Amino acid sequence: MSEPPSEPPSESHPAPVRASALFDPLVAAGPVARQVGDDTWLRGMLDFESALAAAQADVGLLPWHHARHIALSCEDDYDLAELGAAAAKSGNPAAPLVRALTERVAGRDREAARHVHRGATSQDVMDTAAMLVSARARDPLLGELRATADRLAVLAAEHAATVQVGRTLSQYALPVTFGVTAAGWLTSLDAAAEELAALRFPVQLGGAAGTLASLGEHGTAVLSALAARLGLAEPALPWHSDRTPVLRLVGALGEVAGAISGVARSVVALAQSDVGELREEGPAGSGGSSTMPHKRNPVAAVSALACAKQAPGLVADLFAAAEHENQRAAGAWHAEWWPLIQLWRVCGSAAHWLRTGVDRLAVDAGRMRENLDRGGGVLLAERVTTELAPVLGRLAAHDAVTACCHRALEHGTPLAEELAADRVVGAHLSREAAQRLLDPAGYLGSATVFVQRALARHRSREDDQCG
């Protein structure tokens, strides 16, 4: 028996996707889009057919030289436009590809052509191609997320003690540090990346009705060999109507988009002119306005948001398509292809733009302190209440400090002055003591500890990846 044919490529051959010259630079930016275009889907389908023949040779269903001729024909060039036009007749691109492949194989070995696509159905080809495309797109997406997280880890460490206004419901709250803000962004991206990295992509092979009847007693052996050759997981049984593998992938991509969106939205808010705590320092001309010369928009963060906000609708489309009847559905699996491609594209682009924006990010620690001080100390009112509660009682202390805050805001006076002058509060608190309590650096709770914990978790994830 001759040597087995070489295994299908473990990675797709990146090629230009069908491009929109006007919009793709915004919504298909970065390396992920190149892994989900027409060429890479075609590559996934051909890899399936090549590996299927080799798997059948593995278990003795056909001679190796026939499998080799099929594998060689899978490396030929095929006309995407012709396949797409023919797909309209069969409802999917796998059927015309199998016909074209069979013709190519027959030109090399007429007997081998009888074994092309043996035991499989079109959904096997398309589902497996979807998993191969996704497996190959995952690596560059994780690369973007990890690079962004690494940069956020640096910012969190550098600014662990940089005090900043905390904001809840868009209003000033207690002081935080920019380090803990960046650490929160870091952990959200790390968690989303971890969920995506943990996915196992299953091969699909069930034949006409999910029983592999045409392969007889060799069905499960071929399934095992196919999974091994493609580097995909072997399912317990075909999942033609069980779309949970797709839903797990879609959920993970939705989580990635949500994490990116949260970071980008915060960056945009903190870069507002009247906040000014962050800014993007991009190349000349970036962030400009078509009419207002003074504008310096955080364009990378805005672009990340624009892409990430398209993900929820695509996730909903794919969840809506998950209802599959009987052994194989009519239309539902066909409905997955385009939104899945688009979901990968927008998530990849969002990750690319967020990485770009974080790399450009400049932190204005002086403005952060200025914004804190603008409140005249009222942000620390909770600390004063806590200090007075053992003496006055919690409710009486709360009411007295609240009255002082209202006067400070109304008259524009420092809160320490109002506290010291108040009949109830002043009896227990001097102005110097009040000023000490109103120092934001002294009321940060476990912020520094949380930053260190986030950094330690990030390092341990990096170590796990390297290991």
Image (cartoon, grey):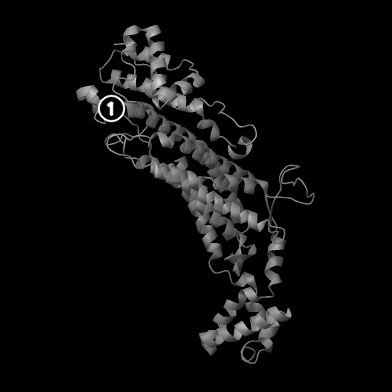
Q: Is residue 427 above or below residue 347?
A: below
Residue 137 sits above or below residue 357 on the image: above
Image position, residue 461 (x, y; %): 47, 47
Q: Position of residue 387 (x, y in %)?
A: 56, 82
Residue farthest left in this picture: 217
- Quadrant where the C terminus lies? top left
The residue under the point 53% across, 58% down is 452
- Can you name the residue that lies furthest to the front here? 89
- Can residue 92 be seen in this snapshot? yes
Look at mark 1 in the image and give the residue it sits on.
208
Between residue 40 and residue 312, name the one nearer to us.
312
Question: What residue is drawn where x is 65% and y is 46%?
Answer: 300
Q: Quadrant of residue 126?
A: top left
Q: Secondary structure at mark 1?
A: loop
Where is residue 348 shown, x and y percent of the image? Answer: 54, 40
In front here: 411 or 356?
411
Position of residue 286 in the picture relative to residue 86 (left or right): right
Q: Quadrant of residue 202 in the image?
A: top left
